[in-house]
Amino acid sequence: MLKIKNLEAGYGKLKVLRRISMHVNPGEIVTLIGANGAGKTTLLHTITGLVKTLAGEISLQGKNINKTAPEKRVAAGCSLVPEGRQVFSTMTVKENLVLGGYVQYKKDKKTAAHEMEKILHIFPVLKERENQLAGTLSGGEQQMLAMGRALMAKPALIMMDEPSTGLAPLIVKDIFRIIGKLREDGNTVLLVEQNAKAALGIADRGYVLETGKIILQGPAEDLLENRDVQRAYLGRDVG
Amino acid sequence: MYWEEEKECMPREDLEQLQLERLQSTLYRVATHVPFYRKKFKEMEVDPDGFRSLLELRSLPFTTKDDLRENYPYGLFAVPLRDVVRVHASSGTTGAATVVGYTKNDIKNWSSLTARVLTAAGVTKDDVVQIAFGYGLFTGGFGLHYGAEKVGASVIPISSGNTKRQIRIMQDFMTTALVCTPSYALLLADTMIEMGININALPLKYGLFGGEPWSEGMRAEIQNKLHILATDNYGLSEVMGPGVAGECRECTGLHINEDHFLVEIIDPETLEPVAPGKTGEIVITTLTKEAFPVIRYRTRDLTRLITEPCACGRTLHRMERLTGRTDDMLIIKGVNVYPTQIESVLFEIEGTEPHYQLIVEREGRLDKVTVKVEVVESIFFDQMKKQRLLVEEIKKRMATELGISVDVKLVEQKSLERFEGKAKRVIDKREL
């Protein structure tokens, strides 16, 4: 699905990502964990094309997308649920969803409407509020809207940046349950999280990012057992 | 039958991506946690963060048995001892022992890898597995023990030695799979024949043999005597133990668990890679080991890589059965000779038994090799002429196949020492 080899990226002279290699297989939830400033968001933005690739290669479904424009990458199948939801607060829930499907459907309103029905089925809360302005939704509802909006593009790979930030623990549980559900429905997810324990709890595999480098990788259950991960990211006092 | 099909049958391209990712994080960890590698990288001006392709493997330093000895006992561990849940030591085939450690995850991976080897050989949860490898510090027993348990088989941890008891348990407990060294399997077979046991009546189906080099001839002999499918498996404690590679039921080479081990074949003299498919020393880099990762470990084992697809469907490349060890190599009159070569020759000659001994001496300035080989009883009852013809034939074959002349001594059956562990077949009396 997604394959990254020796990726380097940054802002101006500042190199943030230093030789990242990773991959995501179809149908997997892969999580990227790491402290603040490790480069997690930069990595997602480089995959979506918002940050320029300085070296290395990114391929999506076997095609090199290094030089593909961001909007074309969405059409090629990678969608981002940005950090802090970024919903269009002065538009209704429905309008937000329509915008999410724009690249994929453009004029095919019928299929778009059909897709929207499916998404409203996954998120019943949104169905209840489909004509409400997005800005009036609670944090958890906005997160679901952001996820639904990304799904409207029928992505091959859906990337989520810190979906649990700023949400009450009960809502967080709900969000993670939905992410698990997305995999059951055949979606492929790349999940960036500071909440390492919850993320590793639902993921198949994980990568640990530290100062722009991947220092550990492996099956999620192995990372949960790894003492370095426990010490640094799970807040567990070992030994 | 596969244990982890998604790994064992992975497309090569995906495997290479996985190997690169795992090697990159291994390099980071050894550079950060193991002073030995930090120093080596600095000396050789290797930037562990600059490693970009598996082709750059050649720029990395080797690790040798001496490096392990110099860092005895814990110097090369990459995690603190409190993260280590198991310590093993090398079987000490040659020289002083070396110490290796395992984290919880290492043990988990090790079990899966030996489970792969057992499954490839045919073992399932319905089997009764008799493990006649030594337990204790040696990795052979425990390694396959955990794999067999993971598969769900019934494990008999009998350990090595006490041949009569092994046989009794094999009969009483209805053992279906035997795990030991090939030379011990042969000793068990011969003892059973001597005891007049009807081997056909045993439920034994599989034999998984490793720990020492053996030949196709020996495989045929074991299969004929024990009426089993005999497969080869490979591993060494410095790298993990058994589970590095194992044969599938095609019996055409051992599938290397390449998602955990990166292998190269080098010329032991020049240290350069050999041409594809040529025989050389196998060098192994671990990709997932947490407690005791090694970079380019020089195994001293000789083999060659087989990259053609295997009929079993595994995409993992194969290594040919070991042809010997660089330190078994005898230099006789300037010619490199491996005991296994001599074994192969003996197997092809009618009338000899697979038990032999090589005695190397120096007379004056010349090397002299004597091959002592057991022969079938009938030869001794026959005329001297037959014996002489046999000796002549062995001499002639040795000269054409090995390029050296040897003395041959025929000895009676069972007159040579038998081994319960690894066989010692060379006696080098030369003082160099």
Image: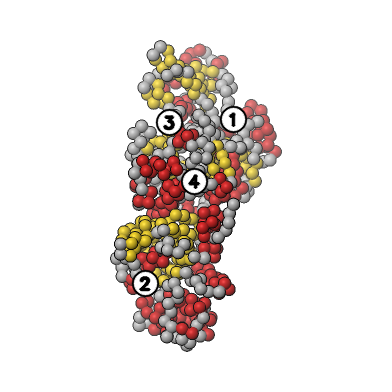
> Which residue bears the numbered disc 2?
A74
> Residue B78 has which mark?
4
Mark 1, chain letter?
A: B
- Discs 3, 1 touching: Cβ within 8 Å: no
> Which residue bears the numbered disc 3?
B326
Q: Position of residue B389 (x, y in %)?
A: 46, 17
Front residue of this view, candidates A36 and A95: A36
Q: Position of residue B99 (x, y in %)?
A: 53, 38
> Which residue bears the numbered disc 1?
B420
Please give the name of the residue rendered at 38% of the width and 49% of the height, measured from the top-left corner: B48
Tell me the mark number nearer the camera, choosing from 2 and 4. 4
Kind of residue indicated by mark 4: Ala
Secondary-structure class at tag 1: loop
- Discs 3, 2 touching: Cβ within 8 Å: no
Please give the name of the residue rendered at 36% of the width and 65% of the height, measured from the top-left corner: A46
Where A94 sits versus A224, above or below?
below
Asked if one can make out residue B203 in the rendered structure from this viewpoint, the answer is: no
Kind of residue indicated by mark 1: Glu
Q: Same chain for the residues at labels 3 and 4, yes or no? A: yes
Going from N to C along the chain, the mark reached first, 3 or 1, is 3
| Left or right of residue A123: residue B23 | left
